[in-house]
Image (tube, coloured by chain):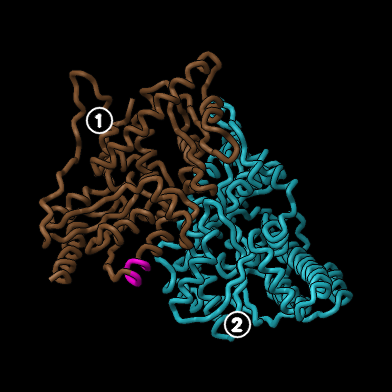
Chain colours: A cyan, B brown
């Protein structure tokens, strides 16, 4: 089995290790390029959201590179993400590609177990053993990647030479990817703090802090969000994404962090009662939390035409107005221009700087809490708790 | 009290209030809320979450599920919002409506109201099927001295063998709101073809839900069922798909329908996307040329 999966931020590093340990050959997806996105956009339905187009283009590249099995996460809820796998398989087959699709969803577990067993020559015992080893290794790598990225995010706003900081990030990610045994992976992850601390900093202590919220793919994949974390870092702003590749694997892959989900639901309840996908509830909750934690601003990214991402916009704006935090929504797709996005980011940063210098600007905004319309609302009847 | 039929100002007001990326029907909805909110004591905005079909759950699109939250976020002042949550996974129909009642004094009446509403709804569904249009719903209740006038009830043209028949697939809230669809059904008639719109029965929707291509959205399931009937039973000459710009679910459904129409049935299709900038002339040209193509193929 030559397995491949679509590219998403740094998630492939852990997934690659996981699949290799299971005994599969892995076709590492190539990094997305303009051409890949355009290819995906040409094959996909016109009004489809951009993560669909990007992953589709990426899958074509994987199949061209010789993959025979495509692995995909899927679900069924009101967001279009649930149909990615099925629709993409159909489009790719119409293009004449032959492959197998392995959908990771609850009702596919027997099929997945079966595939792992085949990889281990039909022996269940070795399949279970390899499965556990694979999970452990994937998790270790994912944790190491997360450690490296966290240090990078903290260092770059203060770095004298942001370029060197970026280079160190790339080098360390490559080390994690190449590391084969657990102790090396741990050592690389453990060295991140020291190695980033060794870079020269400009001694500023209170960088501007911005929370990045929004749809998962747009938050995690630097190609589509124009590398917003590093770019804002170069402008001297610390960006804290609510979701990283590591947390995405934990959140969606294994459903960890239930406490946090519950907390976000409670926080967002006055504004947003039903989770409809696209991390809407998390985005509203995280915005309120960021305001409480004294962040300077919130950036919300979503794919153009994303159903939950668009419909949550007025709610985000109202929550931002009520709490007095600065808020910038960015809608991204294959036509988004880098210059346009950068201009808006720069303007946002100047705004944040001005608010820092002149706290009155901030205090003049409306801190009135949820508006009267919300107070008059009848009590919510039932929650979506049971669905989770 | 109902808001007035969708007009240009309704749409324009909705467009001003909503983020630009929302779909046309939701923008129009907000326009309607703006027009009516100061004239009423309470607004009825149900949250239609899901529907059970053949043991499986089928959901509304995110925008319809979030409609009450959206409405509250957009307007600074609103009358009381009555928001029944229709989610049969966690609530029975009765619970949904009981919880939505604003105060306990009214709770006694809701059962009778619910029964009456259900009877009216099934009568309306029957009439929609015979009329070929749901517009009778807005013509007010039928009384002794006042027979509701039927809007837009065009008798089917004499079915000559030569007449081109165009299956029209689109959400009822778009197709039959002439303020949004610019009367696309009339345009098809004006172009000399017969528009065929189907309202699938529960049995047809259930059958569709068992197909491999079934989608988890209830409205889309209805469209898929309608398209299948149009292609298999009605044997229409072409399919006209009408959708709103930025309709997220439509991107998936229309692709599925177009693929199967072209590959399996060899029936040509055209997709018309509507938004607040759609010009009537452009729509006429496209409908006319599609009908011309179908006429040429038929010869």
* Residue A215 picture quarter: bottom right
Question: Does the residue at mark 1 contact the one at mark 2 (Cβ under 8 Å)?
Answer: no
Q: What chain is tagged by disc 1? A: B
Query: Can residue A199 be seen?
Result: no
The region drawn magenta spans B259-264
Residue at position x 65%, y 82% from top? Answer: A2
| Residue A291 badge | none
Residue marked by disc 1: B139
Position in image of residue B141 (x %, y %): 27, 25
Q: Is residue B79 above or below residue A69?
A: above
On whether residue B93 falls in the magenta region, the answer is no
Relative image position of residue B114 (x, y in whole percent): 45, 25
The residue sitting at the top extreme is: B105
Q: Residues within 10 Å of mark 1 (few under 14, many from 20)?
A: few
Q: Residue at x 22, y 54 (%)?
A: B279
The residue pinned by badge 2 equals: A67
What whole-number distance in Å separates the C-alpha atoms at marks 1 and 2?
59 Å
Q: Residues within 10 Å of mark 2 (few under 14, many from 20)?
A: many
Task: Say yes or no: labels 1 and 2 on the same chain.
Answer: no
Q: Going 12% across and 71% down the picture, which residue do you hit?
A: B299
Image quadrant assignment for residue A238: bottom right
Residue B18: x, y in percent? Answer: 42, 44
Instruction: Establish if A351 lies above or below A47.
Output: above
Left or right side of A327 for B253 = left
* Residue A328 seen in the figure: yes
Secondary element at tag 1: helix
Spot occupied by residue B131 in the image (x, y as percentages of width and height): 23, 40
Q: Residue at x 47, y 65 (%)?
A: A336
């Amino acid at each position: 089995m030559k397995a491949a999966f679509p590219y998403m931020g740094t998630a492939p590093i852990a997934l690659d290790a996981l699949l290799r340990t299971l005994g599969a050959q892995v076709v590492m997806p190539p990094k997305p390029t303009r051409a890949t996105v355009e290819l995906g956009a040409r094959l996909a339905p016109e009004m489809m959201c951009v993560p669909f187009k990007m992953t589709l283009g990426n899958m074509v590249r994987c199949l061209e590179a010789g993959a025979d099995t495509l692995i995909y996460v899927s679900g069924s809820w009101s967001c279009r993400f649930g149909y990615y796998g099925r629709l993409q398989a159909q489009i790719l087959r119409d293009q004449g590609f032959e492959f197998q699709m392995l959908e990771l969803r609850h009702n596919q577990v027997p099929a997945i177990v079966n595939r792992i067993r085949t990889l281990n020559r039909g022996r269940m015992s070795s399949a279970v053993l390899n499965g556990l080893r694979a999970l452990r290794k994937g998790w270790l790598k994912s944790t190491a990647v997360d450690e490296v990225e966290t240090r990078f995010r903290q260092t770059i706003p203060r770095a004298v030479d942001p370029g060197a900081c970026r280079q160190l990030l790339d080098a360390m990610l490559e080390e994690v990817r190449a590391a084969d045994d657990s102790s090396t992976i741990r050592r690389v992850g453990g060295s991140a703090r020291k190695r980033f601390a060794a870079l020269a900093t400009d001694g500023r202590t209170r960088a501007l802090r911005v929370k990045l919220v929004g749809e998962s793919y747009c938050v995690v994949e630097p190609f589509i969000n124009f590398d917003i974390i590093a770019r804002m870092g170069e402008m001297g702003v610390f960006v804290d994404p609510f979701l990283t590749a590591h947390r995405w694997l934990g959140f969606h892959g294994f459903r960890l962090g239930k406490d946090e989900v519950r907390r976000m639901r409670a926080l967002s309840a006055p504004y947003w009662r039903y989770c409809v996908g696209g991390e809407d509830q998390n985005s509203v909750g995280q915005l309120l939390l960021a305001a409480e934690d004294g962040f300077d601003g919130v950036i919300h990214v979503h794919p153009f035409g994303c159903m939950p991402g668009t419909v949550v916009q007025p709610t985000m704006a109202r929550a931002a107005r009520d709490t007095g935090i600065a808020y910038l929504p960015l809608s991204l797709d294959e036509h988004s221009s880098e210059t346009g996005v950068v201009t808006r980011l720069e303007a946002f940063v100047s705004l944040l700087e001005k608010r820092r210098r002149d706290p009155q600007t901030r205090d003049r905004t409306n801190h009135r809490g949820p508006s009267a319309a919300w107070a008059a609302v009848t009590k919510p009847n039932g929650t979506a708790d049971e669905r989770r | 009290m109902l808001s007035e039929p969708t007009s240009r100002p309704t749409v324009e007001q909705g467009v001003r209030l909503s983020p630009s990326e929302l779909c046309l029907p939701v923008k129009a909805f907000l326009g309607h809320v703006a027009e009516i909110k100061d004239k009423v004591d309470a607004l009825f905005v149900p949250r239609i979450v899901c529907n059970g079909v053949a043991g499986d759950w089928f959901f509304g699109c995110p925008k319809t599920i979030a409609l009450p939250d959206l409405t509250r976020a957009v307007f600074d002042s609103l009358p009381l919002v009555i928001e029944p949550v229709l989610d049969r996974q966690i609530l029975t129909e009765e619970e949904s409506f009981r919880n939505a009642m604003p105060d306990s004094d009214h709770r006694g009446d809701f059962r009778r109201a619910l029964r009456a509403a259900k009877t009216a709804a099934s009568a309306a569904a029957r009439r929609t099927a015979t009329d070929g249009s749901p517009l009778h719903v807005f013509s007010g209740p039928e009384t002794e001295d006042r027979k509701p006038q039927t809007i837009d009830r065009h008798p089917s043209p004499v079915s000559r063998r030569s007449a081109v028949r165009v299956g029209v697939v689109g959400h009822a809230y778009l197709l039959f709101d002439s303020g949004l669809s610019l009367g696309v059904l009339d345009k098809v008639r004006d172009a000399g073809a017969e528009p065929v719109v189907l309202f699938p029965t529960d049995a047809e929707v259930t059958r569709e839900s068992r197909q491999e291509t079934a989608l988890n959205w209830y409205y889309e399931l209805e469209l898929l069922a309608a398209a299948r009937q149009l292609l298999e039973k009605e044997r229409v000459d072409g399919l006209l798909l009408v959708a709103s710009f930025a309709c997220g679910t439509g991107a998936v459904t229309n692709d599925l329908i177009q693929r199967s129409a072209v590959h399996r049935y060899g029936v040509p299709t055209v997709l018309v996307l509507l938004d607040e900038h759609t010009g009537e002339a452009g729509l006429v040209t496209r409908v006319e040329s599609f009908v011309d193509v179908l006429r040429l193929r038929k010869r």
